[in-house]
């Protein structure tokens, strides 16, 4: 979870706590004015406990909801026996709605359904325990019905939204794996071609200088080992044998990509390493795809950026790609967080053993930083 997600969750919890405190205060004032302060103490204590459970529900959603419903049932029984105001009151009803809605959204179907029925049982218990002639009893029961219906409806809506997002994310991962798997043909052809050339050279060397054949065989062995490593990185992703392999896009096409983007977006500055050794084909194509996805996101979500900087660097063990824009913060950046293109890029990068980080910069703009491992001393 990113720091922005943690901050948003903390702010949401703080806001909910303020709402709970306001509901408890209003309920206490209303009962003190009509019934007297002492009539609120039992229900108020229960409301405080259920509100606390609602605030910490993410740790144990099921047990928090079970405990909250149990306390609500106990409050109903106590109110009936000791002739107290009808329970659950507004504060407890609101907290129960949060617990039930959270359970319906996040728990497996069976526990979620059981807890939803439990919330309905609490509503029914409040109706049965309410004294017909008590002041405000029907209003409290109606409030509990509305709270339960709202909790179930919101929980189901969010559950469907989460399911759709998860399905879309899985589809993006699958598509990215298929796209990477299509490159298997290019990867294999690249390495096998090198092995064939070295084998043909070994025949020539064997006729002229048999003593150097061992050196040629060592090169073929190294090329074969590297081919196996490259194949292992992608062959496990193959899902559809009927997919045709597309042409691989390499870093030599980055200039074309940047030129095309400059015609419709903010100016882009590309920096490549001055001296670059040959990279594995899967790394080369991934660098291109990362830059393409980052520029696509700039066009979609940061059209007001003044400039974009692309820095591609290489060291003996890895290649890094850093794409930075200076767009001012705004509502568009929030939608950028949930892009599925970066999700697919992360799947590709992690499959190759690398890392990808995407997020807002401290001052302004957005950064996409990817690190892809390479192997030193590759035979070419």
Image: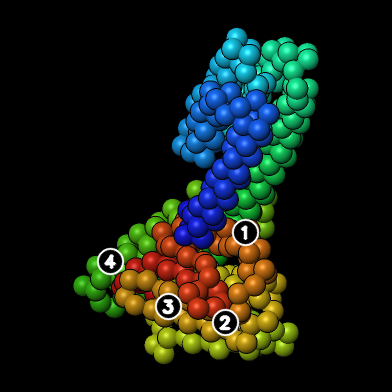
Q: CA distance from mark 1 to mark 2?
A: 19 Å
Disc with the residue nearer the chain's start (3 vs 4)? 4
For the residues labelled 3 and 4, say whether their Cβ atoms are less than 8 Å apart.
no
Mark 2: secondary structure: loop
As measured in the structure, the alpha-carbon distance from the residue carrying label 2 to the one carrying label 4 is 50 Å
In this rendering, the label closer to the viewer, 4 or 1: 1
Q: What residue is drawn where x is 62% and y is 18%?
A: 84
Nearest the eye: 117 or 368: 117
Instruction: Say few, some or many: other residues with alpha carbon within 10 Å of mark 1 (under 14 / 14 to 19 / 20 or more).
Output: few
> What x and y, as percent, mark residue 139?
77, 27
Along the line of sight, the residue nearer the viewer: 275 or 12? 12
Measured as percent of width and height from the top left, residue 172 is found at 63, 53
Of tags 2 and 4, the one toward the viewer is: 2
Residue 152 vertical placement versus 184 (above, below)? above
- Say which of marks 3 and 4 sits in front: 3
CB atoms of marks 4 and 1 within 8 Å: no
Q: Which mark is residue 177?
A: none
> Mark 3 or mark 2, which has the lower sequence index?
3
Q: Which residue is mark 3?
A: 278
Near mark 2 (Cα within 10 A), the count class, few <14, some 14-19 or many ≥20, is many
Q: Which label's residue is closer to the chain start, 4 or 1? A: 4
Q: Which residue is mark 4?
A: 218
The label nearer to you, 3 versus 1, is 1
Spatial distance from mark 3 to mark 2, Cα to Cα?
A: 32 Å
Instruction: Name the foreground residue: 316 vs 34.
Output: 34
Dot 1 or dot 2: first in sequence order is: 2
Q: Which residue is mark 2?
A: 326
């Amino acid at each position: 979870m990113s720091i922005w997600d943690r901050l948003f969750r903390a702010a949401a919890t703080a806001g909910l706590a303020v709402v709970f405190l306001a509901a408890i205060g209003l309920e206490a004032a209303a009962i003190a004015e009509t019934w007297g302060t002492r009539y609120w103490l039992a229900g108020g204590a229960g409301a405080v406990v259920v509100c606390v459970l609602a605030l910490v529900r993410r740790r144990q959603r099921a047990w928090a909801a079970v405990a909250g419903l149990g306390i609500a049932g106990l409050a109903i029984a106590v109110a009936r026996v000791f002739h107290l105001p009808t329970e659950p009151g507004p504060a407890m009803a609101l907290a129960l709605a949060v617990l039930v809605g959270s359970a319906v959204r996040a728990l497996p179907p069976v526990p979620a359904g059981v807890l939803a029925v439990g919330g309905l049982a609490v509503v029914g218990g409040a109706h049965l325990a309410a004294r017909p002639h008590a002041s405000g009893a029907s209003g409290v029961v109606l409030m509990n019905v509305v709270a339960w219906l709202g909790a179930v409806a919101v929980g189901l809506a969010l559950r469907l939204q989460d399911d759709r997002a998860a399905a879309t994310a899985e589809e993006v991962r699958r598509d990215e794996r298929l796209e990477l798997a299509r490159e298997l043909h290019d990867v294999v052809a690249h390495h096998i071609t090198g092995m064939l050339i070295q084998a043909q050279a070994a025949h020539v060397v064997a006729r002229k200088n048999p003593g150097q054949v061992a050196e040629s065989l060592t090169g073929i062995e190294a090329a074969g080992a590297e081919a196996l490593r490259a194949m292992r990185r992608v062959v496990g992703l193959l899902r559809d044998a009927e997919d045709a392999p597309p042409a691989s896009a390499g870093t030599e096409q980055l200039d074309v990509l940047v030129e095309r983007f400059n015609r419709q977006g903010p100016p882009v500055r590309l920096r490549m390493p001055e001296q670059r050794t040959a990279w594995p084909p899967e790394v080369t194509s991934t660098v291109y795809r990362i830059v393409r996805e980052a520029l696509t996101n700039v066009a979609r979500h940061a059209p007001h950026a003044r400039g974009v900087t692309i820095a591609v660097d290489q060291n003996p063990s890895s290649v890094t790609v850093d794409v930075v824009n200076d767009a001012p913060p705004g509502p568009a950046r929030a939608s950028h967080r949930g892009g599925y293109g970066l999700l697919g890029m992360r799947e590709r990068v992690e499959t190759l053993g690398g890392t990808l980080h995407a997020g807002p910069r401290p001052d302004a703009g957005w950064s996409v930083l990817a690190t892809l491992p390479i192997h030193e001393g590759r035979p070419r």
